[in-house]
Image (cartoon, rainbow, N blue to C red):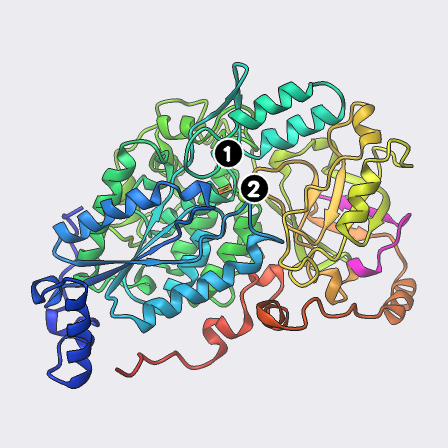
């Protein structure tokens, strides 16, 4: 990527890092002598862009195991282009292992990224992320820090396999777990699934949050063209990693800062791509947070709602699609081919990290398998992947994924069965004699940003065993939680405001009729206004979740789902911009 048309506007003297290394004073003597302590000489730093590489590798993030090797490829690229690479370890946020949920810590990574960039002699950054919250966490921080930024996506893992059947991350865990509970597969089968479902390093290879967010970040303009689709073990991955290192050095000279890339039009493109990909529901929360950090304070659910009515789902990747996985998507042409096919749904004039427009980045890309990346007139779902519902149960909105559910629930009314906490619901659904019908609406509350805490991925509430045994595989479910992007089913999520802070979901009672109408975008409980007022009066706020520590701060400052779950004090418009540190 040496063919950027942008002019070089920075000089060696005007580099940020020169403030650390340049002056003939005592402070800079300290910086230089300590650089020499690391074995560097003046040739390493003088007049060279210093590139911070924020690496979310850790021994317990299986999706980023290759980052130890990839960071060397990035460093090679930075050196080739005449920069100085500095690896800066960052919080790894392993989706599967971190409890109660990585969402509790996304903003911690965002703060860590922002403050590392600001406080260190860094002229540009490479963000190494992929596993669910790492992409948005890193980019949130980089947007606020403001130095030239490029994103290196971890890439999806290879397809899973068991007994000749292809397995998809997450989706097939839930599917075969239900089969085991229904007595249709054996314990031995289940062990086979366990051994075959995660066959390489890399992120979940269904269209989960990782593949959704890395595609969104590429559509925003922060990754080299096509990179987000490349499977982690593919040899194009290290090659693009080195190219990423080379390119970020040029971005520093061109002063290609994030505010030039993350425009309103770029955010809109990201929503359109999310819809065409059949995105994870988590995209709403993260992209709203990102767009608002980029200065678009009014960006919100309405942007998703508008585009969800226009953009069809054309990526036939599970769980919205029925068969294919990210590896198939890559071989069919990947994200470049998908964007090339989106035509008028994208604003192709937006500037990207290549120094060129989005349209130039995707020019010439073509689809090699029309069943994996469908033509616009033969989509897997005619409207977008997500629908935003509002009504007396969710005045600030909630979301459902019509592309990955039984269409019989698109218009549905049924009695609520309400649970106040996850353990009691989990116990009840295992009861084979539970008094529940397929028309019931299963409800979990106190699972939102404050109630969860951290809004865990509990929203695909488990199907009650009593219904599974009767052959049912879907029912209407409702919560203020999130769900994994690899999940599916008629699950209403992100109810805002959440019940824990007194949102109307707190007033719902078992037996009340819940009415969902996806085509009309409405969700209501059929309860008289006076009765709701009575219940509201009798409602008492629950005790705080945390008495000290990070959780205490989180509870005081977390915003609701429809605002992107950022901390209030991190919002761009919260106060005056943070100054460069004194040296
Ligand atoms: Fe890391 Fe799914 S667990 S991407
Ligand atoms: Mg996930």
Q: Is 316 placed left or right of 511 in the picture?
A: left
Mark 2 and mark 1: span between their CA atoms? Answer: 8 Å
Magenta includes 512? yes
Q: Earlier in the sequence, mark 2 or mark 1?
A: 1
Task: Please tell me which residue is depicted at 64% across the width and 55% down the height of the picture.
Answer: 455
Q: Is 416 placed left or right of 205 in the picture?
A: right
Q: Is mark 1 within 8 Å of ligand 1?
A: no
Q: For residue 396, which numbered disc appears in the image?
A: none
Task: Please tell me which residue is depicted at 68% across the width and 72% down the height of the picture.
Answer: 547
Which of 431/265 is in front? 431
With respect to residue 14, does 329 lie above or below?
Answer: above
Q: Is residue 246 visible?
A: no
Report crowding for label 2: few under 14, some 14 to 19, many 20 or more residues within 10 A (C-alpha): many
- Give the labeled residue for mark 1: 206
Q: Position of residue 303 (x, y in %)?
A: 53, 55
Q: Is mark 2 within 8 Å of ligand 2?
A: yes
Magenta includes 152? no
Q: Position of residue 227 (x, y in %)?
A: 32, 40
Q: For residue 485, which numbered disc appears in the image?
A: 2
Q: Which residues are magenta?
A: 505-518
């Amino acid at each position: 990527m040496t063919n950027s048309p942008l002019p070089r506007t920075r000089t060696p003297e005007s580099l940020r890092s020169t403030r650390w290394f340049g002056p003939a004073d005592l402070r800079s003597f300290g910086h230089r002598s300590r650089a020499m302590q690391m074995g560097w000489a003046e040739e390493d730093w003088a007049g060279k862009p210093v590139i911070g590489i924020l690496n979310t590798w850790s021994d317990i993030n299986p999706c980023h195991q290759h980052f130890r090797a990839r960071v060397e490829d990035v460093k090679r690229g930075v050196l080739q282009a005449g920069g100085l690479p500095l690896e800066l370890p960052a919080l790894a946020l392993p989706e599967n292992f971190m409890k109660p949920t990585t969402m509790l810590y996304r903003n911690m990574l965002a703060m860590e990224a922002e403050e590392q960039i600001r406080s260190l002699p860094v002229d540009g950054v490479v963000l190494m992320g992929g596993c669910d919250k790492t992409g948005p966490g890193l980019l949130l921080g980089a947007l606020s820090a403001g130095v030239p930024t490029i994103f290196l996506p971890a890439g999806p893992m290879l397809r899973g396999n068991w007994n000749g059947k292809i397995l998809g991350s997450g989706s097939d865990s839930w599917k075969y777990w239900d089969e085991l509970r229904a007595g249709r597969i054996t314990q031995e089968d289940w062990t086979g699934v366990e051994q075959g479902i995660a066959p390489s390093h890399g992120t979940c290879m269904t269209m989960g949050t990782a593949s959704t967010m890395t595609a969104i970040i590429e559509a925003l303009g922060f990754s080299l063209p096509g990179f987000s689709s490349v499977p982690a073990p593919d040899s194009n991955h290290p090659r693009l990693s080195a190219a990423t290192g080379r390119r970020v050095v040029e971005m520093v000279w061109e002063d290609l800062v994030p505010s030039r890339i993350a425009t309103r039009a770029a955010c809109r493109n990201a929503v359109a791509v999310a819809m065409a990909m059949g995105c994870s529901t988590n995209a709403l929360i993260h992209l709203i947070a990102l767009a608002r950090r980029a200065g678009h304070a009014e960006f919100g659910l309405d942007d998703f709602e508008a585009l969800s009515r226009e953009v069809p789902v054309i990526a036939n990747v599970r769980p919205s699609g029925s068969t294919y996985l990210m590896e198939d998507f890559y071989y069919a042409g990947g994200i470049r081919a998908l964007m090339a096919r989106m035509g008028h749904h994208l604003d192709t004039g937006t500037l990207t990290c290549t120094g060129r427009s989005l349209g130039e980045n995707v020019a010439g890309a073509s689809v090699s398998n029309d069943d994996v990346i469908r033509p616009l007139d033969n989509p897997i779902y005619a409207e977008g992947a997500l629908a935003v519902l509002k009504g007396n149960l969710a005045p600030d909105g909630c979301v459902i994924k019509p592309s990955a559910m039984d269409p019989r629930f698109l218009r549905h009314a049924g009695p609520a069965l309400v649970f106040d906490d996850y353990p009691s619901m989990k116990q009840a659904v295992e009861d084979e004699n539970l008094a529940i019908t397929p028309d019931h609406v299963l409800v979990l509350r106190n699972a939102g940003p404050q109630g969860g805490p951290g809004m865990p991925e509990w929203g695909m509430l488990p199907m009650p065993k009593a219904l599974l045994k009767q052959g049912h595989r879907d029912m209407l479910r409702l919560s203020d939680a999130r769900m994994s992007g690899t999940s599916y089913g008629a699950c209403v999520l992100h109810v805002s405001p959440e019940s824990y802070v007194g949102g109307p979901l707190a007033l719902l009672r078992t037996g009340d009729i819940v009415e969902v109408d996806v085509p009309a975008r409405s969700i209501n409980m059929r309860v008289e206004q006076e009765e709701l007022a009575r219940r509201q009066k009798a409602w008492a706020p629950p005790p705080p979740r945390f008495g000290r520590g990070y959780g205490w701060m989180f509870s005081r400052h977390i915003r609701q789902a429809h605002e992107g779950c950022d901390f209030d004090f991190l919002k761009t418009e919260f106060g005056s911009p943070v100054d460069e540190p004194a040296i």
